[in-house]
Amino acid sequence: MKVRVVVTLKPGVLDPQGKAVHKALGGLGFDGVEDVRTGKLVELDVADDTSDAAIDEMCRKLLANTVIENYRVERA
Amino acid sequence: MKTAVIVFPGSNCDRDIAVALEAVTGVAPAMVWHGESELPAGLGVIALPGGFSYGDYLRCGAIAARLPIVRAVIEAAERGTPVLGVCNGFQVLTETGLLPGALMRNEALDFVCRDAALTVENAQTAFTSRYTAGETVYFPVAHHDGNYNADADTLDRLEGDGRIAFRYAESVNGSARDIAGVLNAAGNVLGMMPHPERRIEAAHGGDDGRRLFEGLLEAVGA
């Protein structure tokens, strides 16, 4: 079973990479982009009977740093 | 005094900090490989060196922070053993939760490699007793992810409790309140981005960093 974990910076946490991408989009002439936030995607291939709780624990213990990041789990 | 340096795959300041510890203590530190699960007995100080442990994969310090040997460092810290984390070592300490906050990509996205002027904020710690509060010292910085971030309540608490050991005299990387080094509540764990171990003798351009290790030696009383 494929599980996708999307890790994003919490609102209010400065995202220098997002700001740089935002500026670069402006440089390419794409106007009207209000804001850009970057994040990361972790794809897990796990046993079908892996519980939600186990995946949540993986996120909290390693995949996301909950001091600065939020995470969202998407099951395929 | 017996000391130890934890060596991770990708550490590159392990030798620098070993040289600094030996210069001050007269005894070469134990170099503890990341695959170990136990620390040598009777350590006075544990150092987590700079570098790029595990290639900075996932987040700087994230993988190293989950190793059994770092679990042993956490337990030693909780028993009161002084722990110094420099650069990547600071990132590892925040990832373990021993220190609050997180170190993010530098605000200007540049790798910063130069001397930085620091203000000693708290000179009454095991790490800073050889400095004077308000004194300016110069340590090299060399990092891409040194932008210290914590929520406002945490920052206020750190300031109120004297847990900011060093502050940049001017912005270096975008760190909240120009924080360069923070302590845990008990005062026996210090994480800092600048490198005191690269400033221990005249040939390094000064010995501002040497006093940190000397103060530590005195504090441990060995």
Image (cartoon, rainbow, N blue to C red):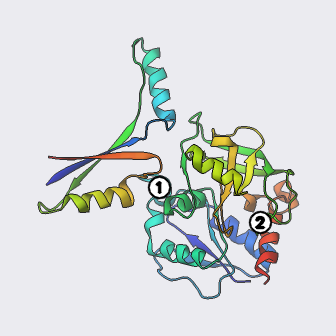
**In the image as oriented, which residue stretches furthest toward the bottom?**
B41
Q: Is residue B194 visible?
A: no
- In this picture, is A19 found above or below B141? above
B173 or B24, nearer to the observer: B173
Nearest to the eye among marks 1 and 2: give it. Answer: 2
Q: Is residue B87 left or right of residue A27?
A: right
- In this picture, is B50 found above or below A21? below
Instruction: State which chain disc 2 sits on.
Output: B
Q: Are marks 1 and 2 in contact (CB under 8 Å)?
A: no
Per the image, label 1 sits on a secondary structure element best described as helix
Q: Is residue B215 left or right of residue A50?
A: right
The residue to which callout 2 is attached is B125
Residue B147: percent from the left, percent from the top? 59, 44
Instruction: State which chain disc 1 sits on.
Output: B
Label 1 to label 2: alpha-carbon separation = 32 Å
Q: Residues within 10 Å of mark 2 (few under 14, many from 20)?
A: many
* Residue B55 circle label: 1
Indicate the quadrant where residue B218 lies. Answer: bottom right
The residue type indicated by label 2 comes to Thr
Q: Is residue A21 left or right of residue B200?
A: left
Per the image, label 2 sits on a secondary structure element best described as loop
Name the residue rendered at 63%, 38% in the picture: B174
B46 or B81, nearer to the observer: B81
Q: Quadrant of the N terminus of chain B?
A: bottom right
* Residue B118 circle label: none
Of the two numbered discs 1 and 2 on the same chain, state the one appearing first in sequence: 1
Name the residue rendered at 35%, 42% in the picture: A40
The residue type indicated by label 1 comes to Gly
Name the residue rendered at 59%, 61% in the picture: B89
Residue B21: percent from the left, percent from the top? 74, 73
Indicate the quadrant where residue B91 lies. Answer: bottom right
B203 or A33, nearer to the observer: A33
